[in-house]
Image: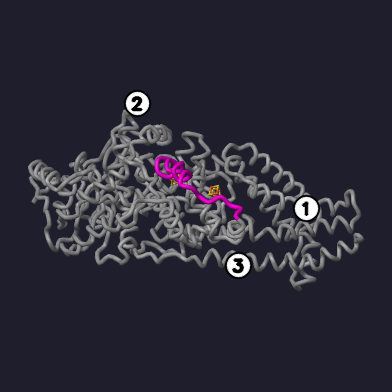
Amino acid sequence: MSGPSLEKGLAAFREQIDAPVAAFFNSCMHCGMCADACLFYTETKDPTRTPIYKLEPLRKVWQQEYTFWGRSMKALGMSKPVTDEELGQWEELVYDSCTLCGRCSMVCPVGNDIAYMIRKMREGMAAAGHAPDGLIGATKRAVTIGSPMGVKLPALQAQIRHIEEDTGLEIPLDREGVDYMCLLSSMEIMNFPEYTAALAKIFHQAGVTWTISSEAFEATNSGIQIGVSEIAAELVQRIVDAAEKLKVKAVISPECGHAYMAIRWEGPNLVGKPFDFKVVHILEVLDELREQGRLKITGKEMQRLTYHDPCQIARRGGVLEQPRRLLDMIADDFVEMPEAGVMNWCCGAGGGVSSNERADDLRLKVFNRKKEQLDAVQAEGLVSACANCRIHLEEGLEEYHMDLPVLSLTETIAEHLAEDKS
Amino acid sequence: MTETEFLLWVRGPALQIATIVFVLGIVARILQMVMLGRKANLAEARGSALAGGLRTMVTRSVPDKGTFQRSTFTIVSGYIFHIGLFVTIFLFAPHILLVDEVFGLSWPALPTPVVDATAVVTIITLLAVLIHRLKDPVMRFLSGFSDYLVWLVTFLPLLTGYIAFHRIGLSPTMLIALHILSVELLMVLFPFTKLMHTFSLFIARYYNGAIAGYKGVHS
Ligand code: SF4
Ligand code: SF4
């Protein structure tokens, strides 16, 4: 495979331009409203970070090659083609300054799904060799090692042993014919083993059969964040193969936003065929168990809790009601932040931003948006359902000297399971 | 060319050409857009793309509370001048009469003084919108030649119409000819500029709503 080039980048742009993209570019009136929808603009006041402007090179290609006017100008040699240098300049806007949170897509009055286009634009950026080093590294590790953080099977096995000792419950590896195959994000394996322990406890109580595959346990997909569909497809295929091999009914996406987007919504499209199994988010599973009366809960969290909707799970993923119903069960004093739900503000670290060290300062700066949202409700605990959000939320809270515990919804539910009497 | 000849040309051949460019241009541009198509979604749907698309086509006209607070001027001025344009174009008695003559279609008009007042409000709002575009850091940064061109060709018919109605300055023949000419300019540029958003925004909103609706989200 030859290296990246401008030609490849532009070819990828062309491949990405479809009817929605054309309708979106064609409709933009430069009203500027998307700027105020984006935390990267509101917290920096830098007009270049206006969502639609992040797409300028892609828009140029569309304009010059897909419109009468643009084509005529091009034929007359009167338009400036997109250059490699230009793409280089846009790298910071397309990767560091966008978490693909999709908030702009909810606000644009003409209806432009800007995040849809930024996701597409990254395909061309990566093909042209203008992706951040941090993401390139993570993607390479995901392909060669199987995890963007370089977590290997022995590390998972060691964790599993610890969890089994702690909980006295079995964590079934590679068990065939069970209901669910659980995926984990590397961050959960390394930083939050409590999540896996929570799964074990809840599933044990509810009588759910489950397993983790030793061949495909990683849920995240760097190929999507960087914008290389071939790699993204390869990573999805690993999960598909494992799920088929273990003959599970469904695959559970863990507390990770983009992993859910990757496997639930992009997955079948990346591998080019519908899955034979279902893909569900852990919150959907828990809510279903709740509905069936299989979650026996005791006691409530008494401190004032609020919930941070991970963008890819809520606005971009459609899991909005489930966490609220679950929280209702375990929280005595639950309060919604202003603009919670579909209009929630991103934490600032999604869409590959957290894998890109260059963006570290920026993501902490834009966390101020989250801070203000939190300040409005004076919560004593912040619940969420994404390990990536969680790490960044913790970092952000520390940076802004806010003393607020960040809780995983799944783990908090596990803490409130009624003792097994049997 | 006398003033009367000029008016006849403007109302005759020029109008025909403008209408042809306008209609064919719009149809061609919409086809050019939609025919790019999009891939079928292979993920299992949670909601209806069609219902979501249709819903967003309508609901996107009303901003959420937070957005309204952040972009109040843009939204309020946008509402005023769009409604103003609609009223002055479609609810002004002489315009309806014209449509009746050409297509045999007619509908009730608003009282002329009301339309006149609307025109004044719309003209003032469009001027404010221009100033806002020039002053707001984001809008100014985003805007290029075509944004100002689009503003101008929208503004001119309104201004010339207002002047013609009040017979200010030139002869009535000349005034009405200039008014029609400004409308023709708008029509000819329409398919090749962002004026196309009048139609394409519904397509854009449809796709936005369909993409979200498929996943069970109201966008
Ligand atoms: S909000 Fe929509 S129409 Fe306005 S500038 Fe952004 S993309 Fe363009
Ligand atoms: S998707 Fe989110 S981060 Fe990206 S441009 Fe839109 S609002 Fe900003």
Residue visible at 62% across and 41% down?
B73
Figure colour scheme: one colour
On what subunit does the disc labeled 3 rest? B
**Residue A300, image x and y in percent?**
25, 40
Question: Can residue A373 be seen here?
Answer: no
In this picture, which residue range is highlighted in magenta?
Answer: A77-96
Q: Nearer the viewer, residue B186 or A182?
A: B186
In the picture, measured across the screen, residue A332 lies left or right of residue A337, that is left
Q: Quadrant of residue A413?
A: top left
Spatial CA span between label 2 and label 3: 57 Å
Report the quarter where the N terminus of chain A lies: bottom left
Q: Kindly identify the residue that appears in the image at 21 percent across and 39 percent down.
A: A191
Mark-to-mark CA distance, 3 and 1: 37 Å
Q: Is residue A29 visible?
A: yes
Numbered badge on residue B114: 1
User: Could you tell which of marks 3 and 1 lies nearer the N-terminus?
Assistant: 3
Q: Position of residue A318 (x, y in %)?
A: 37, 54
Q: Position of residue A366 (x, y in %)?
A: 42, 35
Residue that sits furthest to the bottom in the current view: B104
Residue A262 versus residue B24: which sits nearer the camera? B24
User: In front here: A305 or A106?
Assistant: A106
Q: Position of residue A25 (x, y in %)?
A: 54, 54
Where residue A401 is drawn, which disc sits there?
A: 2
Q: Using the image as rendered, state which of residue A235 and residue A316 is in the foreground.
A: A235
